[in-house]
Image (spheres, rainbow, N blue to C red):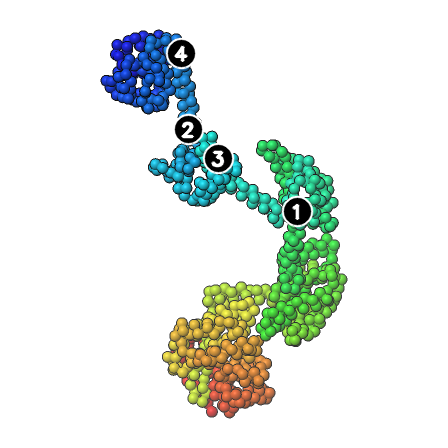
Amino acid sequence: MNLINLIIQNKNSKDSYKKLLKLRDYEIDKIVLLGTESCTLNGKLTIIDIEDKNGVLNLSKISFKEEGFLVVISPFFNKQLKLPKEHLEQKIFYLTKPIDINKFDNILKDSSNQILKSKYLQSKQKTIIDAIDSASLNIAIYNKKGFLVYANTLYSRFNEIEKRSEFHFDDIKNCEADFTSIVQNLKTREVYTIEKKINNKWFKSLFYESSENSIVQVCLEETKEKEKIETLRKSAKFFEHSNEGVLITDDKGKIFTINDAFCKITGYTKDEVIGKSPKILRSGVHDKYFYENLWDSLKHIGSWQGEIWNRRKNGEVYPEWLSITTVVDKYTKELNYMAIFTDISSLKETDKKLYFYANHDHLTGLLNKSQFENMLKKTIEKAIRNTRKFALLFIDLDNFKQVNDTAGHDIGDLVLKEVAKRFLKVLRKEDIIARIGGDEFNVIIDNIKELSDIVLISKKLNDEINKPFNIDGKIFYLSLSIGISIFPTHGLSAKELSKNADAAMYEVKKNGRNSVMVYNKTMTEDLMEKVSLYTDLKEAIKQKSFEVYYQLVVDTKKENVIGAEALIRWEHPEKGFISPEIFIESAEHHGFIEEIDEFVLKKACETLPLLLNKFGKNFVLSVNVSSQELTKKNYYQKVRNILNEFNISSKNIELEVTETSIMQDSKKAIEVLKKLRKEGLSIAIDDFGTGYSSLSYLKKLPVNKIKIDKSFILDMISDNDDNDMVKAIVNIANIFKYEIQAEGVETLEHTKILRELNVDVAQGYYYCKPSPIKSIIQNDWSFKNED
């Protein structure tokens, strides 16, 4: 049932209208009596019944909230009626009295249809507005002057205009275009577009003119689209500028695109390969089964990768690492194959170099120790299969350390390179040679017939090395110590053969170097003894199992003690006392001497206060310094630190060095000794006369004292040569104004001769044998010469 508003001037008309309208399926929603009340009605269908002019005048009391339909029934023609201006906005139908029922019915029917149509349009308009308002786009409508007519919620929120009563387009922040320029641009195009980045987000605004002469703005965020475009741009850039070659084929295997790297690697231009098959790159290295496996992998797995050899346009065959992937477009289902490859020629070359350096000595180019051990095992296996002999040579370069110490490691390296060249000059191509250590080499001479042949080859090697080495204008003379073991006579394993050849080489060293020796069993026993000594010495150093003994130094004129020499002693729990001459040599060879020297100096400093208390404040304690320690970079500072640690005055310490230790690197040694002298320490040359220093060098040495070696003192009584040597040494000391001290004084006769030579300082068993500190402190030392 339809609702209708009824406005009447005569209340008696109400019932008549009710009946009339009910018959036509209308129900009165609201009845208003003209002249008695004011009200506002909705804009639906409204009937106004007027009986006279007063009714017309009272119409001003009625107003409408929205547009609707009016049916005005009166005794006047419509031109005679002057309705309020507000009412004229409604759609009006006029009827004059008496009412024409047919015409009345037609008006009702027509107005009802129009109301229904209006409701439909309003509903549709609301739906559109709601849709626009909830859209993810910023949408606004401006009039031709640039003022906002409509904006959806997103647009209002984004531009912060919800609470503003009036808003102009030019009030938008961060907008570079003004409204006037937009209007001008729309005169020459249907849609005007602006793109702008705000707060790291991209926006695109589309402007167009509506049929109502308004300007519509649609703004959308396009950040993701921009990122996709940028990704595609970068991908295209990568494709074009990648160092890896790229080609893409269709499902038939025809090339339809390549990149620049493809052209650079293969030598082909784009025009030469587009539309061709990748088969033009085939090198002929791989058989048909290789390619069948490749295509089988692509069909079933969708990818293949591996190393492949291809051919460049110029015919050069080269290796590449190839990866092929099957690509299917998810929309068109179109199938393509994408191949990415890298030229690995340089890697292959690097692999060769890595293999070489992994198996060869970097300096000389000879095999290294690891690879030589592999070759030795293979040679043993071959010799067993073929029942034949071979020789293993263990070669040590004599006195090479002096080259490094005197000329430097750079020169030493050049010497080693020249040594390797000379070895190769003598040896056969089938012989195997390796550098296994700093100055040590191994050689395998296979399929030998006579032992004499091996000895002869070894001597040829030594003769070649005996020739002078002229390196950067410096001349060096070297020799070889060569030990030989024979398979299977001297061992069946690589370890045993190496051990026995090493033992033979050490035997050569022991007997003066510069020679060749074939292994025998006695050498193994000597070697085992050395190994045992090394093991025990290492443990003794770890456990600090040494003791320091003291041998007093006497002023023979005053017959009193003026000092002592600190001497290291080692009592083995099973072997008893081991001579320092034996274990010191082993310590120097194996690099333990630094720890032993430090132990003795610290122990000496620890006991020195007891000795000063016993013998007086001028007592001087002597400590031996090894050649290896003397030229160490930090030796001077180490001595200072130890003296400071024990609060010892430098004037109470004397350091004893040998001529040999100074001459190994005289420049460095003299520099260190000068610094020690300046610090206040006394410096003595020990075992003088047994070394090889010249008088010119002796003059340069910053020393206080010369100690005559005991070998001259012991035999000076019976041997005129030794007696003359002692006299010569005394004269040298007097010339250079050095103090002089005799070692090895064992008899009264020695003391008398020495006094005659004005040697007034002595040490030896005549006065005191080396003793523990307890004996030195507890005994009463009084020396009365028996004339």
Q: Amino acid at mark 2?
A: Ile
The image position of residue 518, as x and y in percent, is 68, 66
| Residue topped by disc 4 | 106
How far is mark 2 from mark 1, CA to CA?
A: 57 Å
For the point 43% across and 24% down, the residue is: 124
What secondary structure is found at the residue carrying circle 3? strand
How far is mark 3 from mark 1, CA to CA?
A: 48 Å
The image position of residue 755, as x and y in percent, is 49, 90
The image position of residue 591, as x and y in percent, is 54, 68
Which of these two is toward me, 704 or 284? 284
Q: Amino acid at mark 3?
A: Tyr
Which of these two is toward me, 387 or 221? 221
Left or right, 572 with respect to 464, comes to left
The crowding category of the residue bearing disc 1, from other C-alpha atoms within 10 Å (few below 14, some 14 to 19, many at least 20), is many
For the point 69% across and 47% down, the residue is: 269
How far is mark 3 from mark 4, CA to CA?
A: 44 Å
| Residue topped by disc 3 | 208
Which marked residue is nearer to the observer: mark 3 or mark 4?
A: 4
The crowding category of the residue bearing disc 3, from other C-alpha atoms within 10 Å (few below 14, some 14 to 19, many at least 20), is many
Which marked residue is nearer to the observer: mark 3 or mark 2?
A: 3
The image position of residue 8, as x and y in percent, is 28, 14
Which marked residue is nearer to the observer: mark 3 or mark 1?
A: 3
Work out whether 662 lies above or below 26: below
How far is mark 3 from mark 2, CA to CA?
A: 18 Å
The label on residue 129 is: 2
Work out whether 773 lies above or below 263: below
| Residue topped by disc 1 | 262
Q: Amino acid at mark 1?
A: Phe
What secondary structure is found at the residue carrying circle 2? helix
Quadrant in the rendering for residue 695: bottom right
